[in-house]
Amino acid sequence: RRRVPVATLHDLGLGFTDSDLAIDGSLGSPRRGAHATLAGPAFTVLDPEVTHTREDALHAPGCGVLVALGGGSAVRRVGPGLAEEIARVLPHMPVRIAGGFTHGSPSTPRGSRVTWVHAPDGLAAALRESAIVVSAGGLTLYEAAALGRPAVALAVVAAQRPTIAAFARRGAAVDAGFIGDADVVRRVVDAVAALAAEPTRAAHLGASAARVIDGRGVFRVADALRELAAGGRRRGTHAA
């Protein structure tokens, strides 16, 4: 109504509305009839810090396993037990778990080799330092891919399933299923152990992921937003 150009951000084709610039950087297939102006992983908006550290990460394999299941309750409900089991099966590898949005670090059993990561400003550094990532199907999966980190992904909500399946189809992650599956912990641990035992396969998975997500989407979207703003100022009208 005020003739201000409007841009909208979407995921998996959800929530499309009449805007001047619709951006959907998701890898999963959008819903039928949903049409973004800028679509696909070339326009995935990630923390610029991921891009700034990408080259170093691609030439440094990292060490250990990072479990990062997002910011919700899954961190406390499933994360600790999963991390402990990975540490048990892979005693030679350090295992860390990202605390998400939870308050403080939950206690770990005496003698545990699992450590908690508190990263309120983002996981770019923790991802870069890791050799294998266990991720949910959200933004962290895209960040791990941009940094060339082989990832084992499990959906912590049903809506993440299409994204994880899309990564798996592209050879950019291992699909370990849904967090509610009875054998999900075993599947995740087996997948992580297999990658640890086959570094060539892990490196190939990480390289495929880095080709799918180049991390520069944030800059492409910023350029498009500047163009949209400049065009609206020149015309003095809504850009649509």
Image (spheres, grey):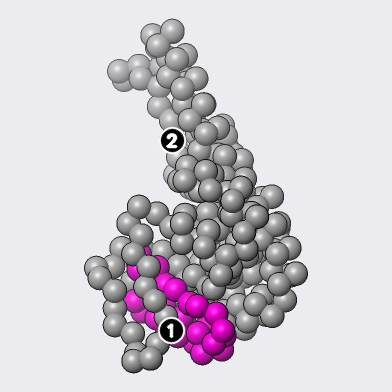
Is residue 75 in sight in this rendering? no
How packed is label 1: few (under 14 Cα within 10 Å), some, or many (20 or more)? some
How packed is label 2: few (under 14 Cα within 10 Å), some, or many (20 or more)? some
Q: Position of residue 204 (x, y in %)?
A: 73, 63
Dot label at residue 172: none
**Along the line of sight, the residue nearer the viewer: 22 or 223:** 223
Dot label at residue 113: 1
Dot label at residue 8: 2
Is residue 70 in sight in this rendering? yes
Disc with the residue nearer the chain's start (1 vs 2): 2
Rendered image quadrant of residue 41: top right
What's the distance in space between the residues labelled 1 and 2, CA to CA? Answer: 43 Å
Q: Residue at x 49, y 66 (%)?
A: 136
Q: Residue at x 40, y 22 (%)?
A: 5
Judged by depth in the image, the label closer to the viewer, 1 or 2, is 1
Q: Is residue 76 magenta?
A: yes
Q: Residue at x 64, y 54 (%)?
A: 58
> Bounds of the magenta span?
75-100
| Callout 1 amino acid | Arg
- The answer to whether the residue labelled 1 contacts the one labelled 2, judged by CB atoms less than 8 Å apart, is no
Helix, strand or loop under label 1: loop
